[in-house]
Image: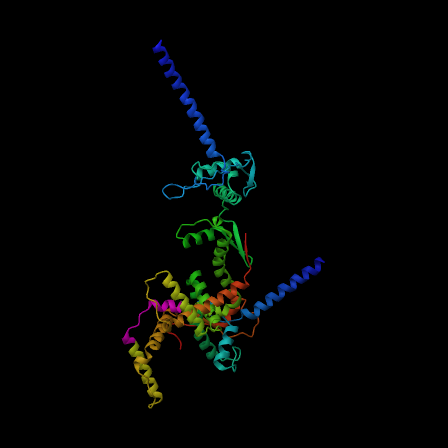
């Protein structure tokens, strides 16, 4: 049993190291930051529509490609280093929210109902703030409603236990 | 002798008169008390002025049986008994001494008194959990009390600072509010891959950098003229859009050029030409052997 276990571990280790070998192939570096062959091939695939790969690319082409990929790589590393955790979370959240919201449709009547509700609440609160017309507020309201829908959908699925 | 008779007569008169008046008074009283059986109309209830005399009813007061003061009338949350004497003392205080016995109250009011005592006890003997205690879990992720307390403090402008003092309904609302960002974060982590993340961070960093850089109208105009010349050189009949319509695009291009220009200053680039050897990327000296060090870059290679 012990031997089988040992063999399994060794096999797993062998698999991991061989898989890292494939992905760790370096096409070049920028200030010591690696640009992998995978990344180079991905860019080439887009640029040459799949006609060229890193392996088939001539020397000058390789040099040009690494030059081209270098700024993006540097920006990626710098961004990761310089952005705060809060900024990163905020950026991811707004991207994700926009993506989700684009799939949700809010009708004009829904927006109108929400607008009327808002008006009522403002009246009740005796608010002195100037409320924009429905036409002006419509786009913003639709966005807000879409956002609420996305969040409420998520919250419905969430398992909350109070202790 | 005559004098003696007169004096005796006077004394007799004085003593007999009151005796008769007592008898009269008694008989009149009896008449009033007795029910009229003569069939005549009873006018005793009618006042002379025409106003009806208020009828006085005699209320028979039956005092309820009171239980001893050591009677247990209920229990506090921790199981401790609520004694009647505690309720009596509370009642006395609340009614300013008008009611001193709980048993004089109807059942509904007795229950109210008991609830009041239980509430007061709960407030007096309240023990809040430690700030690191887990007050809820959201998809298995814990929310600690400190987080809820801080949230409450900010929402109520410092009026409520302790989550444990909230009733259950309000606790749920607070937890739901705190759960939203957690649920969102989880959903984001599960749906955005590393490549997407890298791209998002890059865009954000560039946008942030753009805020710190200024672009003059001269720079924009120079770029416009350059582009115009290039376009006309390629096609002399090309329709060139007006400078004003390209304003933002030109500005962005210059900004990105400036950012990238700064990024690529003193950059060290190496290109690995030979990849036929499978070990080349792991062994550093092999990589160095097959790689070519480029000169330091000062300009972006377009």
- B18 is higher (above) or lower (below) than A50: above
Quarter of the rendering containing residue B253: bottom left
Q: Residue at x 45, y 28 (%)?
A: B26
State the residue in front, B203 or B192: B192
Res. A43 visible in picture: yes
Q: Residue at x 31, y 79 (%)?
A: B223
Name the dominant secondary structure of the magenta segment.
helix
In the rendered view, does A129 fall on the left or right side of A88? left
Res. A34 visible in picture: no
State the residue in front, B167 or A58: B167
Does residue A2 show up magenta in the picture? no
Position of residue A115 measured from the top left corner of the image (x, y, whole percent): 40, 69
In the rendered view, does B5 fall on the left or right side of A41? left
Residue found at the very far right of the displayed protein: A1
Q: What segment carries the magenta color? A: B205-219
Residue found at the very far bottom of the displayed protein: B237
Does residue B218 show up magenta in the picture? yes
- B128 is higher (above) or lower (below) than A97: above
Q: Residue at x 52, y 73 (%)?
A: A38
Position of residue A86 measured from the top left corner of the image (x, y, whole percent): 43, 61
Residue found at the very far top of the displayed protein: B1
Position of residue B83 measured from the top left corner of the image (x, y, whole percent): 54, 37
Q: Residue at x 52, y 65 (%)?
A: A154
Quarter of the rendering containing residue B226: bottom left
Residue found at the very far left of the displayed protein: B218
Count of numbered labels shown in the rendering: 0
Quadrant (top left, top right, bottom left, bottom right) of the N terminus of chain A: bottom right
State the residue in front, B273 or B101: B101
State the residue in front, B46 or A120: B46
Position of residue A89 measured from the top left corner of the image (x, y, whole percent): 45, 63
């Amino acid at each position: 049993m012990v031997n089988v276990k040992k063999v399994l571990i060794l096999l797993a280790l062998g698999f991991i190291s061989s898989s890292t070998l494939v992905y760790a192939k370096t096409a070049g570096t920028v200030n010591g930051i690696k640009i992998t062959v995978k990344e180079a091939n991905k860019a080439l695939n887009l640029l040459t529509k799949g006609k060229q790969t890193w392996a088939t690319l001539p020397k000058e082409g390789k040099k040009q490609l690494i030059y081209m990929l270098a700024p993006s790589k540097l920006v990626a590393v710098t961004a990761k280093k310089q952005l705060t955790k809060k900024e990163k979370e905020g950026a991811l959240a707004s991207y994700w929210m926009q993506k989700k919201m684009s799939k949700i449709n809010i009708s004009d009547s829904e927006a109108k109902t929400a607008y009327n509700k808002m008006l009522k609440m403002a009246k009740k609160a005796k608010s002195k703030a100037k409320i924009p017309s429905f036409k002006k507020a419509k786009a913003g309201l639709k966005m807000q409603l879409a956002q609420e829908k996305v969040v409420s959908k998520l919250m419905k699925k969430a398992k909350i236990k109070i202790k | 002798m005559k004098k003696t008779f007169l004096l005796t007569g006077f004394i007799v008169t004085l003593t007999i008169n009151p005796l008769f008046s007592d008898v009269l008074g008694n008989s009149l009283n009896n008449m009033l008390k007795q029910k009229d059986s003569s069939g005549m109309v009873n006018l005793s209830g009618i006042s002379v002025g025409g106003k009806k005399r208020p009828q006085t009813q005699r209320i028979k007061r039956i005092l309820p049986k009171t239980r001893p003061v050591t009677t247990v009338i209920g229990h506090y949350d921790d199981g401790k008994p609520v004694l009647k004497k505690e309720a009596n003392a509370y009642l006395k205080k609340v009614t300013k001494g008008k009611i001193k016995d709980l048993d004089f109250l109807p059942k509904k009011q007795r229950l109210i008194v008991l609830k009041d005592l239980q509430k007061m006890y709960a407030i007096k003997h309240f023990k809040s959990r430690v700030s690191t205690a887990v007050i809820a879990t959201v998809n298995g992720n814990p929310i600690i009390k400190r987080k809820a307390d801080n949230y409450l403090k900010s929402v109520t402008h410092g009026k409520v600072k302790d989550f444990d003092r909230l009733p259950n309904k309000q606790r749920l609302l607070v937890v739901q509010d705190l759960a939203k960002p957690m649920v969102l974060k989880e959903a984001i982590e599960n749906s955005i891959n590393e490549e997407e993340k890298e791209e998002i961070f890059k865009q954000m960093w560039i946008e942030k950098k753009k805020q710190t850089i200024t672009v003059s109208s001269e720079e924009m105009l120079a770029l416009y003229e350059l582009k115009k010349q290039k376009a006309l050189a390629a096609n002399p009949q090309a329709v060139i859009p007006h400078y004003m319509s390209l304003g933002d695009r030109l500005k962005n291009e210059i900004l990105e050029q400036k950012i990238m220009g700064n990024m690529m200053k003193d950059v060290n680039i190496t290109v690995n030409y030979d990849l036929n050897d499978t070990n080349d990327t792991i062994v550093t000296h092999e990589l160095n052997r097959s790689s070519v060090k480029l000169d330091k870059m000062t300009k972006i290679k377009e």
